[in-house]
Every structure is written in C-alpha cells, then in structure tokens.
Image (cartoon, rainbow, N blue to C red):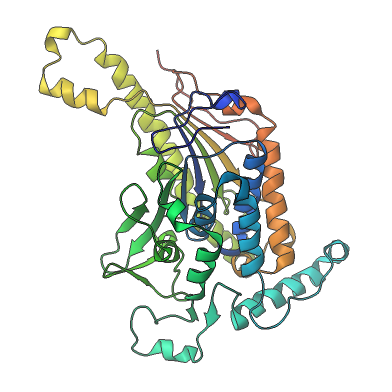
C-alpha cells in the first residue's frame, strides 16, 4: 500500500511501477450527472491498491474529491456509492421502477423517452440531498442577493457532504492534498482552494459546483464564487505546475470527449458543443505542458555544461531555477461510452439506472487501463512527459527525444 502524505508517496512494492513517484494525483473534471463515471474509475484504482496522495476537482469532480479525501481508503468506495445513491433519488416521489436488464431490450426510442422523463423530473423536482427548485423561480428574474439569484437552492448539499465526508480528515494534508477550483464572480479570476493553504469547508466544494443560472454563487469570506468550469473544467494545470521537481503520476478522469463526429441535427449540435466546451482545455493543457517540460529538461542539461566559475552569474541562477528534471506520466480516462444516454441533457439526467451505467463504465475503463501495467512505469529521462489513453490506438508520448 502506498504511503500517503503531502510530501510525496513511496510504494512498498505491491505496485512496483509506482515506487518512484512522489506525487500520485487524481484529477476530476466537471460534468454533473456523468460524475458517477469518476466514482467507477476510483473503484478500479482502489481495487489495484492505487491510492492517490493528491486529489483535485472541478464542479461534480470537486464533490467526488470531497468524498474520496474525507474517508479512509477502505471506506471510500462505499461512501462514494452512498453519496451517489443519495443524490440520484428524486426528493418527493420514488424513482421510476425500471429493470435495467429489461431496458437493454428496448428500442432506442423507448430508452430516449425514459431519459427525457428522468431529466424532466430533475428539472421539476430537483435531486435528493443536492438541489431543489425555488418555490417561486420567476423571482430570480428580479433583484436578489447573489446567493439567491438562481433557479435552484443547493443548501441541501452541505448536509450531504458532511454526512459522507469527514472534514477534519479533508483538512489533514498529511493524509491527502486536496484542491478544488472556482471562479470569483466579482473579478472573474480563477481560484483554487487548497488544504495546504486554507481550511476547507463544505462551501468551498459547493462553490466549485455552483453553475449559473441553475445554482447560485456561494459566499466564502466575503467573496462570491461560481463553478470553476466557467473558466477551466479541469484542474490538470494546477497539478502539473505545482510540486516542482517531484515525479508525478496523474490520473486525469474526463467526462467530455474532445473528439467526435460533426453533428447533423440540432440535438447533436448541443451534445457536441458541450463536449468541445468542457474538454478542449484538457487537450490544450496537456500539449502545452508536454512542450514546456521538454524545454525545461533541455535547459537543465545545458546548465550542466556551464563551468563552475560562471555559475554565480545572475542569468545562470535564473535559468537554473527555471530548469526541471521532473517527469510526468498522465493516464487519461475519458467517458466516451455514454451509449444509451448520449443526449444533450446527459449531465442532468440523475436517474439511478443511468448512474449505475456510468459507474460501471468507469470501472470497466479503469480495468482496461490497468491491464497495461507498463503504463504506470516512470518515464525515461529523455521523455519527461508521456500520456496514455486506452481509447487511442497507441499511447501518445513526447515526440522529441532529447540528446
């Protein structure tokens, strides 16, 4: 089992490919109801005894991060399951009684009608322990306070988080580092709330998932915050630019796919728009960091060629500080098998049936990914940034070999 802590992780040998990593990070993208896919991925990692020492999330990813960080390893999967089974229940009437095996025999049109019904229930009723419609939603058109200017009330989420996550544990950075992203409504700047810098409270996680106009801004220390996905739907950049000189294994779990066919009708347009809007920054960040790390590694090699008598030079000192021998291995898991619920409302279709389908897909993807144990190996020094993705024909790696 990996030893966890803010200072890094060393493995005792059960997962030999992890032995040389100081950071094992789990990065969770936003995506509403699709977030149970991330819970399935985590279950697969837990089965393989891969325990992150840093978890970072945006929106629904932040809520999953709270449950993971707020429980000891042996309880995390059960608490994730309890959390999702809670928020995937309608608040007033029982869920639609549907047998999952029977649904598989239905023609696509019947399944589509079921999904429409379930998404409509979410809009009209809300979700248990998560959000409820405001009694007079039309009042949101008039002057309100920032924390009431929304269609739904999310105050229930505080009690749900406190039920399934221990905030004393969340704030113990020796157990796990925790980072969640949100947007400052006043200045539009992106902010990260990190347990190595501040004490995290339920509102920090709720703010990360406060997507307008459905959810109102959340007040934290006199400032109001919205969903971090408005600026960046993944905390990957935060992970990759922190903890200098620590070799890092990063499990990036995305709920939106950057790749897809050109849409042919307006429903497909809505689906594709969400995919591009919420996934493109992941690709951009990965490509940018791949290029940056290549040059930082090259710079370090050049620094070694400078004679000792010239190393007091100010420019040498600056360049040496900018150089880096850190190696990154990014394992990318993307929810592509949306299958029967691949519709424009898939991020707010919270039915238990669909939730379990998402979860199962995440677990399967984790199994398929970990069937390549060589992907967990520390990258060689001449390839300081590598990525792996089971959905691609071959793993992608840096294409430039350093001399």
The image shows residue 89, relative to residue 378, as above or below, that is below
The image shows residue 184, relative to residue 214, as above or below, that is above
Q: Position of residue 105 (x, y in %)?
A: 88, 63
Quadrant where the N terminus is found in the figure: top right
Along the viewing direction, whichever of 90 and 403 lies nearer the viewer = 90
The image shows residue 353, relative to residue 261, as above or below, that is below
Along the viewing direction, whichever of 307 and 401 lies nearer the viewer = 307
Please report the residue visible at 60 percent of the width from the left and 43 percent of the height from the top. Answer: 333
Image quadrant of residue 287? top left
Residue 338 visible from this viewpoint: no
370 vs 160, left or right, is right
Please report the residue visible at 35 percent of the width from the left and 86 percent of the height from the top. Answer: 144
Image quadrant of residue 347? bottom right
Q: Position of residue 141 (x, y in %)?
A: 40, 88
Along the viewing direction, whichever of 78 and 145 lies nearer the viewer = 78
Q: Position of residue 394 (x, y in %)?
A: 63, 30
Please report the residue visible at 59 percent of the width from the left and 23 percent of the height from the top. Answer: 13
311 vs 20, left or right, is left
Quadrant where the C terminus is found in the figure: top left
Residue 9 visible from this viewpoint: yes
Q: Position of residue 261 (x, y in %)?
A: 63, 53
């Amino acid at each position: 089992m990996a030893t966890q802590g803010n200072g890094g992780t060393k493995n005792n040998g059960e997962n030999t490919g992890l032995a040389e990593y100081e950071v094992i990070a789990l990065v969770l993208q936003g995506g509403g109801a699709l977030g149970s896919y991330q819970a399935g991925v985590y279950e697969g990692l837990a089965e393989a005894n891969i325990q992150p020492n840093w978890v970072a999330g945006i929106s629904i990813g932040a809520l999953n991060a709270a449950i993971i960080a707020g429980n000891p390893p042996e309880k995390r999967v059960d608490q994730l399951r309890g959390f999702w089974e809670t928020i995937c229940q309608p608040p007033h009437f029982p869920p639609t009684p549907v047998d999952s095996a029977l649904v598989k025999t239905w023609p696509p049109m019947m399944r589509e009608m079921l999904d429409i019904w379930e998404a409509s229930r979410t809009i009209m009723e809300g979700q248990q322990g998560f959000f409820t419609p405001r009694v007079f939603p039309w009042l949101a058109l008039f002057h309100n306070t920032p924390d009431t200017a929304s269609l739904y009330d999310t105050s229930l989420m505080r009690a749900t988080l406190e039920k399934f996550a221990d905030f004393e544990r969340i704030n113990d950075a020796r157990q796990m580092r925790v980072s969640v992203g949100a947007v400052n409504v006043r200045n539009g700047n992106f902010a990260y709330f990190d347990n190595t810098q501040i004490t995290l409270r339920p509102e920090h996680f709720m703010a990360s998932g406060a997507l307008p106009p459905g959810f109102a801004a959340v007040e934290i220390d006199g400032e109001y915050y919205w969903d971090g996905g408005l600026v960046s739907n993944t905390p990957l950049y935060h992970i990759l630019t922190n903890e200098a000189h620590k070799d890092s294994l990063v499990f990036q779990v995305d709920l939106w796919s950057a790749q897809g066919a050109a849409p042919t009708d307006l429903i497909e347009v809505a689906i594709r728009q969400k995919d591009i809007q919420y996934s493109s920054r992941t690709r951009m960040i990965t490509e940018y960091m791949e290029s940056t790390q290549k040059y930082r590694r090259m710079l370090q090699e050049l620094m070694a060629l400078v004679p000792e008598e010239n190393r007091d030079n100010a420019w040498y000192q600056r360049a040496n500080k900018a150089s880096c021998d850190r190696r990154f291995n990014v394992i990318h898991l993307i929810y592509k098998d949306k299958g029967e619920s691949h519709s424009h409302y898939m991020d707010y279709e919270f039915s238990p049936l669909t939730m379990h389908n998402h979860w199962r897909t995440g677990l399967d993807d984790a199994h398929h990914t970990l069937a390549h144990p060589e992907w967990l190996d520390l990258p060689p020094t001449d390839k300081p940034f590598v990525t792996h993705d089971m959905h691609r024909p071959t793993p992608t790696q840096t294409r430039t070999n350093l001399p």
